[in-house]
Image (cartoon, rainbow, N blue to C red):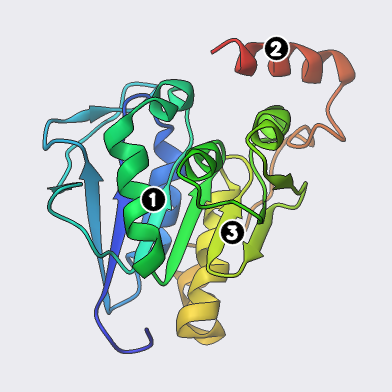
Amino acid sequence: MTEQKTDIAFVLYENMTALDLVGPYEVLSAVPSATGHFVAATRDPVRADNGLTVQPTTTFAELTRPDVVVVPGGSGWRNALEAADLIAWLAAVHPAATWTTSVCTGSTLLAKAGVLAGRTATTHWACRDVLAGLGVEVSTDRVVFDGDVVSAAGVSAGIDMALRLVARAWGEDAAQRITLGLEYDPQPPFDTGSPDRAPAEMVTALHAAVNAL
């Protein structure tokens, strides 16, 4: 994939999380040979879970051999599990893709499509039990590479995943330049980004809220 044109499919569905999509998009679209495609069931605008609307540039029927697939998570993941066209498309394009990736609860969609069979993957901490229930060996790592499948945990881990993917596919120098260009230098103001460090009552409440969606 070093110099060849690379078609990257960024999957859209109702109530996805925008940053799960946009974080990896900003990283991967910085690769000169990469062309990003926003793919959905139709070309109708797709609304993310906090209101951002994204315009698809192609459809599942039109884009049949992407080189890279990026599946975001979001509050709409349960409904997306029942979206037959989306799940069938993921199952169909994965075998020919160089990389199939997910962010957050997007891993549940890969599992439903059979992509994670016999593999290890990660997801948002509040949905690890759901992913395990789909027959996946669940990791608590922030980013997991298992063969040609890459999964990232919650929202911001999607940026880490994309940078590590760039390093694998196009070299560490490219990944380092993109990191610098984005000024990706996280310094979170609160140390509650992990359930291991957040107050227990906060973890319990958020876990219940996420699984009630």
Residue matched to label 2: 208
Residue 94 lies, in percent from the top left, at 39, 59
Q: For the residue marked with disc 3, what is the amino acid?
A: Asp
Instruction: Name the residue located 78 percent from the left edge and 46 percent from the top edge.
Output: 140
Q: Amino acid at mark 2?
A: Ala
Q: Say what secondary structure mark 2 lies in.
A: helix
- The residue wearing badge 3 is 160
In space, the residues marked 1 and 2 are separated at their CA atoms by 30 Å
User: Where's residue 134, x and y in %?
Assistant: 63, 35
In the image, residue 205 sits, relative to residue 24, either above or below, namely above
For marks 3 and 1, the one nearer the N-term is 1
Give residue 108's position: percent from left, percent from top. 54, 37
Q: Quadrant of the N terminus?
A: bottom left
Residue at image location 70% in from the left, 17% down from the top? 206
- Give the foreground label among 3 and 2: 2
Please tell me which residue lies in front, 31 or 177.
31
Depth check: 180 or 196 in front?
Answer: 196
Q: Tell me the residue at 24%/80% (across/down).
A: 5
Upstream in the sequence, badge 3 or badge 2? 3
Dot 3: element? helix
How many other residues sit within 10 Å of disc 1, few (<14), some (14-19) or many (≥20)?
some
Which disc, if any, is residue 69? none
Q: Which label sits on residue 91?
A: 1
Quadrant location of residue 189?
A: top right
Residue kind at label 1, given as amino acid type? Ala
Question: What is the count of numbered marks?
Answer: 3
Going by the picture, which residue comes out furthest to the bottom?
A: 3
